[in-house]
Image: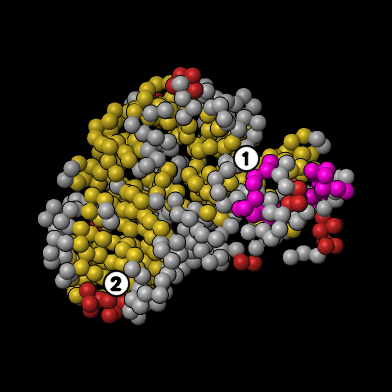
Amino acid sequence: MKSVGKLICLLVWISGSLQSQSLSLTITKRYLNLPVSQSQSRGTMQFTIQGKPERSFKIRLATGKPDYWVFCDMAALKGKAITISYDGNLEGLAPIYQDDKIAGQDSLYKETNRPQYHFSTRRGWINDPNGMIFYEGEYHLFYQHNPYERDWENMSWGHAVSSDMIHWEELPTALSPDSLGTMFSGSTVIDYANTAGFNRGNTPAMIALFTVDNPDKQVQCMAYSLDKGRTWTKYTKNPLIDSKAKWNSKDTRDPRVFWYKPGNHWVMVLNERDGHSIYTSKNLKEWTYQSHVTGFWECPDLFELPIDGDKSQTKWVMYGASATYMIGAFDGKVFTPESGKHYYTTGSLYAAQTFANMPDTDPRRIQIGWGRISQPGMPFNNQMLMPTELQLRTTKNGPRLVSVPVKETEQLFDLVQQGGDLSAAEANEQVKAFKELDRFRLTTTLKLSHATSAGVSLFGQRILDYDLNSNLVNGVFYSPENMTSMEVTADIYVDRTSIEVFIDGGAYSYSLARKPISTAKEAIQFWGNRIDVKSFKLYTAKSIWK
């Protein structure tokens, strides 16, 4: 992969011996590439500059042929001399090298199991989206991230930006572990009024509120950025909230913060032990406990939505990590539930969050969720699901959340085949011609003739299974708005490792892992007892990666 001469030029041993457990080098390139083997035990690696710790993380350094490579972005340290120490197997230090490319750059985004129109990180593990915010033409997606392995560890805030929520540019890690602990979930705001005092001239601070986790407890902290989230300064008086004693629980995490205009104050929704607590503040630094709603776990969200688009008729939605929600009223300090808990989606989605600071000209409530879908054999793991717009729609049971892919996703898909008023056999004969099975979109409306199951399969995997007798869609209870309807409509998005399905205009949705392409003769199959395929449309899908 590199010559011995190149390696010697890049790495200078402090003692000239592996027994030193450290090496020193001057940073001359953008990236430091590190070999990883999943069969190795984790060790702690530390970077120091003039004896002062710069970063510390756990990694499984490979001692032989690596399973894959990860990297450290060293752009901010160019020209500096650093010392690297490691308390694991010292043989793993030798292959480390600098370059202006990450190892595997030439195949980046072309890997076998790389999602092609869902966001995934270049290397490492991702889970919960964090701090999603729109600011000056950019959508910011922060997320829980382990840059150094495809499994969970070293929780940091990864960072990507987009102009359309579809095409993403990954930026350097925003928040890394420090002496207080690792960086857990949270949210960001733009402090236009300079309530926290971090603004510079006419530049408002982007402020992140987040949980720091350590073996003893979880506390709430703050950092700010004056360059659109590219670099961050942690508040010197962290933590802001330490509520372990109050709740007799370590589980106090995931602050969701927003400005409540009627009360002229900030609101924080914080998961504490058995539900979501409400705190308020005038300056983002000093917080006052106000109330608590039990029955939720992790990653809260709280937002107001118009009913059927009517801004004079609104309700508040309180939301938890498992995608259950309550509908109610909020006075700036207390959320009063009026109905729930409800669900609108199931499957792989978890810990979804909505974008803050959407402009007045585009007041949509847009959500992105973590897709708990593994990418086998890859140097990265998990993905984000498609951005969706949340709406409150009147139903026979009252207002309920619906979720539909944002309009920006339309640019990805080209209609190539359609048909309608066909039997399953006739439809199956027509879809045989569709060969773009790596990634595609299928919309369809099926009409059943019997109260039995019907649906769509992909290489034998039932990606739509509507059991009218038991009112189940892929095993989950679903009752259509028209209680006597014999029809079901599905909008199905298939990527390399994932499937997302939106039923009846987003009234219910689900996501699941896609099984590998098999040798089954028929790829897409409509099935059921004398069903009528009223319509189907097949679309090819573009890749979001350049």
- Which residue does the numbered mark 1 point to in the structure image? 176
Residue 525 is marked as: 2
Residue type, label 2:
Gln
Q: Quadrant of residue 176?
A: top right
Query: Local crowd at mark 2 within 10 Å, few (<14), some, or many (≥20)?
Result: many
Q: Residue at x 25, y 55 (%)?
A: 473
Q: How is the image coloured?
A: secondary structure
Residue lying at 55% horizontally and 60% vertically, measured from the top left: 377
Does the magenta segment cover residue 24?
Answer: yes
Question: Picture coordinates of residue 415 (x, y %)?
Answer: 36, 72
Name the quarter where the N terminus is drawn: bottom right
Q: Earlier in the sequence, mark 2 or mark 1?
A: 1
Residue at horizontal 37 percent and vertical 42 percent from the top: 322
On the image, the x and y values in percent for residue 514 come to 40, 62
Quadrant position of residue 207:
top right
Number of numbered discs on residues: 2
Left or right side of 153 for 314: left
The front one of 159 and 263 is 159
Give x and y (percent) for residue 34: 70, 53
